[in-house]
Image: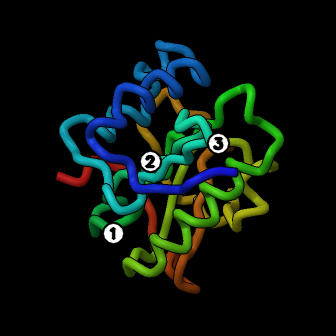
């Protein structure tokens, strides 16, 4: 049994610990973190799941970004993590679906991420939608994925992803 809730400032240390556990402390050296520097996450979409002992079992965050010369607005999904002892229980899928539904309700139209297409495909992400999207190096272009929250939202969206500011 999990309670989904919006991440609060006091949850940050526990969520950061979970991300370090899931991805290793060197995770902040990844190029996607350069897009997050100096930008606040989209608070309404940063969710966590607490178990019956009030421990964080999973967490997900989103950041606003701009794409290409037009500055098309998009969400950058990530990181999403589930505690190793809670993996395989569907918690990651629950966080993904709930947060994507909330993103659509907040009128966001597109989401991008760097990840494994076989995992994210079940949530509607594809490499084909992101063929013209570029992340800062060193990012493997085959791992850049996108999802349209509104049909056609990725049409014409091309170029480098940059910070929101």
Answer above or below: position of 71 versus 95.
below
Disc nearest the viewer among 3 and 2: 2
Q: CA distance from mark 1 to mark 2?
A: 20 Å
Q: Is residue 86 left or right of residue 44?
A: right
> Sequence order check: which comes first, mark 3 or mark 2?
2
Gap in Å between the C-alphas at discs 3 and 1? 21 Å
Mark 2 residue crowding within 10 angstroms, few (<14) / some (14–19) / many (20+): many
Would residue 91 be found to the left or right of residue 40 on screen? right
Q: Which mark is residue 61?
A: 2
Residue at 58% across, 22% down = 23
Q: Is residue 160 visible?
A: no
For label 1, the SS is strand
SS of the residue under disc 2: strand
Q: Is residue 110 above or below residue 43?
A: below
The residue that mark 1 highlights is 72
Between marks 3 and 1 in the image, the one whose residue lies nearer the viewer = 3
- Residue at 38 percent of width and 48 percent of height: 7
Picture quadrant of residue 94? bottom right
Circle 3 sits on which residue?
115
Residue 153, percent from left and from top:
50, 79
- Label 3 element class: loop
The answer to which of 33 and 81 lies nearer the viewer is 81
Report if the CB atoms under discs 3 and 2 are less than 8 Å apart: no
Q: Position of residue 162 (x, y in %)?
A: 31, 48
Q: Position of residue 140 (x, y in %)?
A: 61, 34
Q: Nearer the viewer, residue 152 or 14?
A: 14
Q: Given the current orientation, which residue lies at the most extreme top position?
A: 25
Q: Residues within 10 Å of mark 3 (few under 14, many from 20)?
A: some
The quadrant holding residue 82 is top right
Q: Position of residue 22 (x, y in %)?
A: 61, 24
First of labels 1, 2 by sequence position: 2
């Amino acid at each position: 049994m999990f309670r989904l809730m919006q991440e609060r400032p006091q949850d940050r240390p526990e969520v950061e610990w979970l991300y370090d556990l899931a991805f290793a402390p060197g995770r902040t050296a990844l190029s996607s973190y350069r897009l997050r520097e100096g930008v606040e996450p989209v608070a309404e979409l940063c969710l966590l799941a607490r178990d019956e002992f009030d421990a964080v079992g999973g967490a997900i965050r989103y950041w606003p970004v701009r794409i290409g010369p037009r500055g098309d607005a998009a969400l950058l999904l990530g990181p999403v993590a589930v505690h190793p002892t809670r993996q395989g229980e569907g918690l990651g899928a629950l966080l993904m679906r709930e947060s994507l539904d909330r993103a659509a309700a907040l009128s966001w139209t597109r989401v991008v991420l760097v990840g494994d297409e076989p995992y994210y495909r079940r949530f509607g992400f594809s490499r084909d939608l992101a063929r013209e999207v570029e992340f800062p190096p060193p990012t493997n272009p085959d791992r850049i994925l996108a999802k349209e929250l509104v049909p056609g939202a990725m049409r014409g969206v091309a170029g480098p992803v940059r910070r929101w500011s």
